[in-house]
Amino acid sequence: MTKVLVVEDQRALADALELAITAQPDMECVGAVGSVEDALPLAAAGVDTVLMDIHLPGADGIEGTA
């Protein structure tokens, strides 16, 4: 099972990505959050893939990936 974290501040897009991920039998969306600050604890818990927006409030996606 591939664990995916979505980091996207546009709620409609985050919801659509979460729906698409959960529709896959071998994927699990572990969260859909709108900021790097909210993503860090989820990522630290263990994920396989992070879909990260570059333009986010506070720290941007590039800083968050680092």
Image: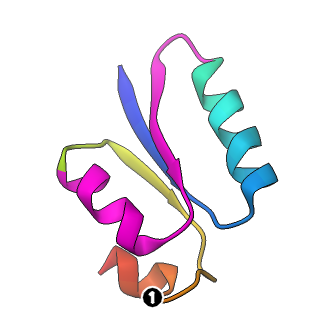
Say how the picture is coloured. rainbow
- What's the residue at 69%, 29% (across, down)? 19
- In-image side of 17 versus 25 (left or right): right
Residue 32 is one of the magenta-drawn residues: yes
Residue 9 is one of the magenta-drawn residues: no
- Residue 1, quarter of the rendered image: top left
- What's the residue at 57%, 84% (across, down)? 57
**Can you give x and y, in whole percent of width and height, for residue 27 in the image?**
48, 23
- What's the residue at 29%, 43% (across, down)? 47
The residue sitting at the top extreme is: 25
- In-image side of 2 versus 22 (left or right): left
In the depicted structure, whether residue 6 falls above or below residue 10: above
Identify which residue, 44 or 2, lies in the foreground: 44
The residue sitting at the right extreme is: 12
- The amino acid type of the residue labelled 1 equals Ala
Identify which residue, 47 or 10, lies in the foreground: 10
In the depicted structure, whether residue 56 falls above or below residue 6: below
- What's the residue at 60%, 17% (across, down)? 24
- In-image side of 45 versus 40 (left or right): left
Local secondary structure at mark 1:
loop
**Magenta extent:** 24-44
**Can you give x and y, in whole percent of width and height, for residue 3 in the image?**
37, 33
